[in-house]
Amino acid sequence: MTEITSRYADFEGLREQAIALRREGLGLRQIRDRLRIHNNDIPNRLVRGEPAPEWTKRPRARDDLREKARELRMRGMTYDRIQAEPGCSKSSISLWVRDLPKPEPRYTNEERRALMNAGLSRLRATRDQERLKIKAHARDAVGRLSDREPFLAGVTPYWAEGSKDKTYSRRESLQFINSDPDVITLYLRRLEPLEVPRERMRFRVGIHESGDVAGAEQFWADLAGVPTSSLQKATLKKHNPKTTRKNTTETYHGCLIVHVTKSADLYRRVEGTWYGIVLGADSTAG
């Protein structure tokens, strides 16, 4: 103030003039030019405390967003819902509405969990429908098989799960083991074109000792179409206390072992067919 007074001896007189011009509706630049003041800071000091005219108050776009955000907050909306409507950041919303009381939660913890579980159930149901649709489409695309195709299809699981002949251990006989009922059914159908009678087939159940042995034998006997009395003695797998078994549900039936007697020639046909499949699938083979 001392510096201003020294440069403008009649400061109070200038202030009175500046306030009068301000009340007439002039802006700071107009007051500066009218009073011939060359320091841009002086007009601010001369009119300090005097409100600016309305025309100098330019509205800002964010003012509308702020008012909208405050209105929505007072209606009980969360930051996420407010952000979705005005289209501004959560950090800005937090600054604008921090003086307002927090809205009451729309749902209790139990209700939120119920809504979440319902949403997960709908999502799982949708995914299950997609899985079934893809599987059904693939199933229908296979169409009707010829007599040759089931035989070829049955050779592949046998070569993966059946006993095989080794140079150091001759085992030229058909013996197949699997726990999948569909695979067992496919294998038994593969034996039909080979004209293998059921009298030459020996069936035996392999199951964990803590499983339902009698139930498993009944299950596999029904699948194979033979009486349970024709089954050989079951092979029981001993329990290892260091491991935790997961195959303990009612659907656990162990494995079925299918052995064909006098099957050396049949085994050689299966092995030869397998290598024929391998060569047929290899486009580079001769």
Image (cartoon, rainbow, N blue to C red):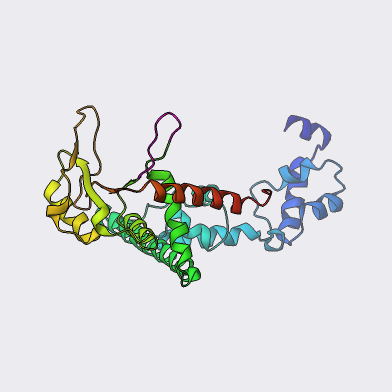
State whether residue 47 is above or below residue 68.
above
Q: Is residue 26 visible?
A: yes
Give the quarter of the image for residue 45: top right
Query: Quarter of the image holding residue 114?
Result: bottom left
- Is residue 128 placed above or below 265 in the rendered structure? below
Count of residue discs: 0
* Residue name at image x 22 percent, y 53 percent: 251
Report the magenta stretch's main SS. loop
Residue at position x 87%, y 48% in the image: 36
Using residue 204 as the reference point, say whether residue 21 is left or right of it.
right
Q: Nearer the viewer, residue 38 or 130?
A: 130
Viewer-nearest residue: 132 or 125: 132
* Viewer-proximal residue among 203 and 104: 203
Q: Quadrant of the N terminus?
A: top right
The location of residue 123, given as percent across then percent down, is: 39, 61
Closer to the camera in the image, 195 or 243:
195
The magenta region covers 166-173
Identify which residue is drawn at 47% across, 56% down.
Answer: 80
Place of residue 69 in the rendered image (x, y in percent of width and height, measured from the top left): 51, 59
Could you say where residue 10 lies in the image, as x and y percent from the top left? 79, 40
150 is within the stretch colored magenta: no
Q: Is residue 98 visible?
A: no
Q: Position of residue 276 (x, y in %)?
A: 55, 51
Which residue lies at the image location 39% right of the left edge and 41% below the top edge? Answer: 172
